[in-house]
Amino acid sequence: MTVANRSPKRENLLQAARSLLHRQGLRATTLADVAVESGVPLGNMYYYFKTKESLAAAVIESRLGEMEESLTAAGQSSDPRARLENYLQAMLPLADQLARYGCPYGCLAQELVRMGGAIGRKGASLLEKQRDWLTAQFAAMGAGRRQAGELGLELQASMHGAIVLGLGLGDPEVIRVRLKALMTWIDGLDVREVGLAR
Amino acid sequence: MTVANRSPKRENLLQAARSLLHRQGLRATTLADVAVESGVPLGNMYYYFKTKESLAAAVIESRLGEMEESLTAAGQSSDPRARLENYLQAMLPLADQLARYGCPYGCLAQELVRMGGAIGRKGASLLEKQRDWLTAQFAAMGAGRRQAGELGLELQASMHGAIVLGLGLGDPEVIRVRLKALMTWIDGLDVREVGLAR
């Protein structure tokens, strides 16, 4: 990391870009928008980020780091079932924000993958990291490789779908209801009894 | 309906707008883009659609009509379980398109609700219509009012989540796997045994 990478101005720009990309998407955001939001003059900005692509790459790295942190936090328990419930529990207080702006990972990944190429793969990696972690918890609960993969995908789809509906219906309660239902499901799930994943 | 509403030029503009809004979203689409895509000169376009808002309203009406048609088609069976499976079955051949561009209802609703006001409520109405139909099928299967609502929301979230992952991971197979798993779930679901919806 260079000195420029650690500067407070770079950090302000990155935080502004994270927020704008979440609220309005990458396509609709200009470097000038980020400069205004951050309070860093546009002329200074080019010292840190010369293109929208380099800024988008920094936002993806930052979101990957944030997801890593939330997975590590949820993973503190020795019980995989509790780890999954921790992860869902941590999303509950974010329901209002998620219903207002959507999922910062899902929305970003969807927008990036549409752009294709290296940046599209970077976007997909956000969702892959989440899916792999969820799958690993079901495997640790005793599910076979294939079943763990199906359960991981099911839980991930259920979480993202709840956020789509919360945003699309304009109702954060939808997100809370679904997250609680998913916790109840995990709590009662016996992976040895599940023949076919739902 | 006026003569202008039934003209082939208006229909071309509407089809172009439907396609562009699905592929790139409302925000990123200009009236000029729609003119180019439709082959109707921009000067003529203003006769049919003077603002992006009026064009967006026509796209929403068209999507509502299309959803109504797909629900009616799925509803031909006398068995509510078969009606739900018909609906999911009809989505299967669309998996590639859904993984490429996302859900034409979910993406539109999410974008519109962010704009707020009357157009935001119109967007939400797309998802409300779908949710109410799904809920009605579970009620017809014998679920109580609250349970039917929870199951309807669960199925709707699962469908939309599958599309988010298909698009975000760039993998239509994710959508097919989840749709088939949901059909298996509906096939085996005994609503009298379900105490808490997942």
Image (cartoon, coloured by chain):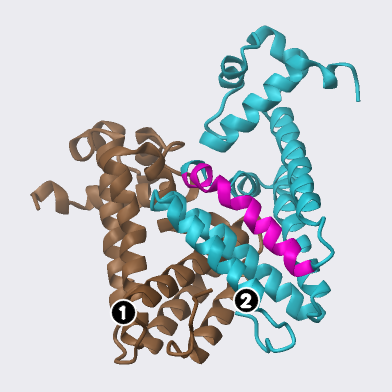
Chain colours: A brown, B cyan
Q: Amino acid at mark 2?
A: Val
Q: Report the magenta residues as a range.
A: B80-99
Q: Which residue position is annotated with label 1?
A: A73
Residue A97: image location, x then y, percent: 53, 63
Residue B186: image location, x then y, percent: 65, 72
Write the residue at 51% across / 59% down.
B162
Image mark 2: chain: A
State whether residue A140 appears in this view.
yes
Taking the view exactly as shown, the residue that stands out farthest to the left is: A2
Q: Is residue B69 left or right of residue A40?
A: right
Is A160 placed above or below A13 here? below
Write the residue at 28% across / 49% down.
A122
State whether residue A59 appears in this view.
no
Write the residue at 36% across / 59% down.
A127
Q: Amino acid at mark 1?
A: Ala
Residue B111: image location, x then y, percent: 59, 45
Tag 1 and tag 2 share a subunit: yes
Whichever of labels 1 and 2 marks the residue nearer the N terminus, that label is 1
In the rendered structure, does residue B91 fall within the stretch colored magenta?
Answer: yes
Q: Is residue A13 left or right of residue B19?
A: left
Residue B168: image location, x then y, percent: 42, 51
Give the distance between the C-alpha atoms of the residues marked 1 and 2, in whole angstroms: 23 Å
Badge count: 2
Quick one: quadrant of the C terminus of chain A?
Answer: bottom right
Quadrant for residue B62, please give it.
top right
Is B96 placed above or below B197 here? above
Write the residue at 37% across / 76% down.
A148
Task: Say which mark, if any, is on residue A134.
Answer: none
* Secondary structure beneath label 2: helix
Task: Say which mark, if any, is on residue A177.
Answer: 2
* Secondary structure beneath label 1: helix
Mark 1 residue crowding within 10 angstroms, few (<14) / some (14–19) / many (20+): some
